Image (cartoon, rainbow, N blue to C red):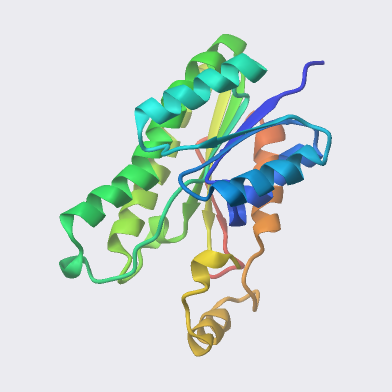
């Protein structure tokens, strides 16, 4: 049986890296991308290759269709196509909406939502030909309920959730499942800006009494990418009972 291929965007660190390593441990061909952290991306590639699987690393902006087309061309040459697409690339923005520049708004849409459109558009034709495939979008609880001072981020994640549900209906007849993981507070560098007292207060709000781990997200994503042919169009909360 030929080895399947996973593409994980935003995989130089944190959740994306954990997901890519999880699939590598399970014997997948792995393609990874990030926008600027070349050294970290190559470090992740080296770690993945330590599991005796091939890894294609690409430095580029997934919100830019030209970059995406170049990446998918390299994947076709190396592996044939993408069997599992994990759209993880994204950025956060903390601040009042009234203080946000139009440029920052456009950047959020570009990085968090257009990147998902681009990668899905390019991954789908191969999956349709295979009559199988998995698309897993990494979202956030703020896409479900919204967060003060993260209106733009919440809007992009809400867009991802709606796209997930709609695309799942579109692709189900072709044997392709589309789901999203709405992450709560996960212990990654994205939260390191918080003061210690704010972090303690945040943890106090979470019934599980702790932050989630990137490896826990990776376990769920792998499960969604490997099994569950009937589970599609779902936004699955992974938040320790927080929201």
Residue 182 location (% of width, % of height): 51, 54
Residue 22 in sight in this render: no
Above-or-below relation of 28 to 239:
above
Residue drawn at (60%, 51%), measured in percent from left and top?
40
Q: Quadrant of the N terminus?
A: top right
Above-or-below relation of 41 to 191:
above
Above-or-below relation of 23 to 36:
above
Which residue sits furthest bottom? 197
Residue drawn at (65%, 39%), measured in percent from left and top?
224
Residue drawn at (57%, 64%), measured in percent from left and top?
239
- Residue 242: image quadrant is bottom right
Residue 91 in sight in this render: yes
Horizontally, is 37 left or right of 99 in the view?
right
Residue 228 location (% of width, % of height): 68, 34
Residue 156 location (% of width, % of height): 34, 50
Horizontally, is 118 left or right of 41 in the view?
left
Of residue 196 and residue 220, the one placed in the foreground of this image is 196
Which residue sits furthest front? 39
The tally of labels here is 0
Of residue 63 and residue 216, the one placed in the foreground of this image is 63
- Residue 210: image quadrant is bottom right
């Amino acid at each position: 049986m030929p080895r399947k291929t996973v593409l994980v965007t935003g995989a130089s660190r944190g959740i994306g890296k954990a997901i890519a390593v999880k699939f590598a441990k399970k014997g997948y061909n792995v393609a990874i991308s990030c926008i600027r952290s070349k050294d970290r991306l190559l470090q992740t590639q080296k770690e993945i290759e330590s599991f005796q699987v091939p890894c294609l690393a690409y430095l580029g902006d997934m919100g830019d269709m030209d970059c995406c087309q170049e990446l998918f061309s390299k994947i076709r040459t190396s592996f044939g196509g993408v069997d599992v697409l994990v759209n993880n690339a994204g950025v956060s923005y903390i601040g009042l909406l009234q203080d946000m520049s139009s440029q920052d708004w456009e950047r959020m849409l570009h990085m968090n939502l257009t990147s998902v459109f681009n990668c899905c558009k390019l991954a789908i034709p191969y999956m349709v030909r295979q009559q199988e495939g998995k698309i897993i979008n990494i979202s956030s609880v703020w896409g479900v309920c919204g967060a003060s001072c993260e209106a733009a981020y919440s809007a992009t994640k809400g867009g991802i959730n709606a796209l997930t549900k709609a695309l799942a209906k579109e692709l189900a007849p072709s044997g392709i499942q589309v789901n999203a993981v709405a992450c709560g507070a996960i212990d990654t560098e994205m939260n390191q800006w918080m003061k210690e007292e704010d972090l303690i207060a945040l943890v106090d709000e979470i019934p599980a009494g702790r932050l989630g781990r990137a490896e826990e997200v990776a376990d769920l994503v792998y499960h969604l990418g490997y099994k569950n042919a009937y589970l599609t169009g779902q936004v699955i909360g992974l938040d320790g009972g927080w929201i």
